[in-house]
Amino acid sequence: MTQSNWRTPLAVLICSGIILTLSLGTRHTFGLYLQPMTLDLGWSRQTFAIALAIQNLIYGFGSPLAGMIADKYGAPRALVAGTLLYALGMALMAFTRTGWDFSLSAGLLVGIGLSCSGFSVIFGVVGRAFPPEKRTLALGITGSAGSLGQFLMLPYGQALINHMGWSNALLICAVTVMLILPLSTALVEDKKAQAAQSHKQSIPEALREAFGHSGFVLLSSGYFVCGFQIMFISVHFPAYMIDQRMTPETGMTALALIGLFNIFGTYLWGWLGNRYTKKYVLSALYFTRAVVVTVFFLSPVAPLTVYLFAATIGFLWLGTVPVTSGLIAQVFGVKYLSTLTGIAFLFHQVGSFLGVWIGGYLFDTTGSYRLMWLLTIGLGVMAALINLPINDRQIVRPAMRPA
């Protein structure tokens, strides 16, 4: 078949969604391994947390580089390399015995794999496949597929751990991730046609332009808070449930509910971003998230309140992703969308690193997650405020103006 008769926008959307289902869904299962691995290997929670914090940091620093590779040479090359490293890292996690081993496998290798198979690479292709009036909604649908992965992979991972042990579960999940390889062929783009249609600008010029734009810096700073909040909850929530005398299945079910409602939430926020001013949509999302965490923090911990919290926070979980990416495309265009979303995602992952690590540090220091919940609430309010003054007008470059 030729490129024109099967790599349609719909095919790109479907295959991109399945790739994120596998990549991000598997990532969200890592919190399930905290309790069994720390008990079997005699680790503190901070030992486990620091490796996943490194993973999020590597994921962040690798995303701009993966985005540059995807923008210049095509997304499939980044996806193939990333998938192989992702699977290798998970396989080595199964045989880890020390914190150093775990930081190398779960931290470095899986982090690089995620950077090459995550939002920045995928959203660049999807953003270029759809016109502006449909772009944010298409990104929301793709992000929803990543949420579906969280809903599907968490019960899958928990069942594997319960019946086969954490080591075998990791090996099976490593094989599952390899399904990304054949799907990546749908994301081949016609780079020559894109070059003929777009303005002339190099990657260094695009980066200087973005960092000279105050709106990009504010947008990325809000993204930092998003990463801090969701990775603290994703990694530490199952253990927090056990601390509250809940079963491991309660924490797993809560994370699965987050993934389920995130499917609808990501689509909803993408739809809102398509219809209304994106910076106001983002501000409303962050403020609502702070309110939801506050209500949960002040409520008695019981299965009902846990599941209500999970369902509500799920609506707000990854809604930032399509709106943030759509706003970047609106202001800067789509030529280097993977690169610029990768840069913004670096801020997100620095937040993720701190959310995972500080959560483990504060628990080991104080014996409680109380201070972490308060910090999560305060940062949510801050993110709501800093998105309001963003300059969201499209940049008009001299080469783009008609002669």
Image: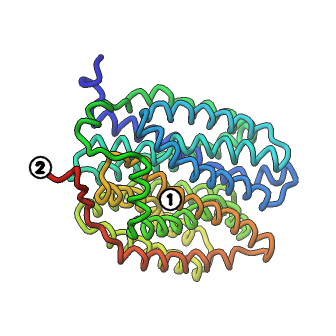
Where residue 135 sits: x, y (%)? 27, 50
Image quarter of residue 121 = top left
Determine whether, in the image, residue 208 is placed left or right of residue 43.
left
Query: Does residue 259 show up?
Result: yes
For label 1, the residue is: 258
- Towards the viewer: 398 or 3: 398
Image quarter of residue 93 = top right
- Marks 2, 1: nearer the viewer: 2
- Towards the viewer: 62 or 223: 62
In the picture, the quarter occupied by the N terminus is: top left
Looking at the picture, which amino acid does disc 2 mark?
Answer: Ala
In this rendering, the answer to whether 73 lies above or below 134 is above
- Towards the viewer: 237 or 241: 237
Looking at the picture, which amino acid does disc 1 mark?
Answer: Ile
Q: Is mark 2 on a helix, strand or loop?
A: loop
Query: Does residue 250 show up?
Result: no
For label 2, the residue is: 403
Where residue 401 sits: x, y (%)? 17, 53
Where residue 347 sits: x, y (%)? 53, 61
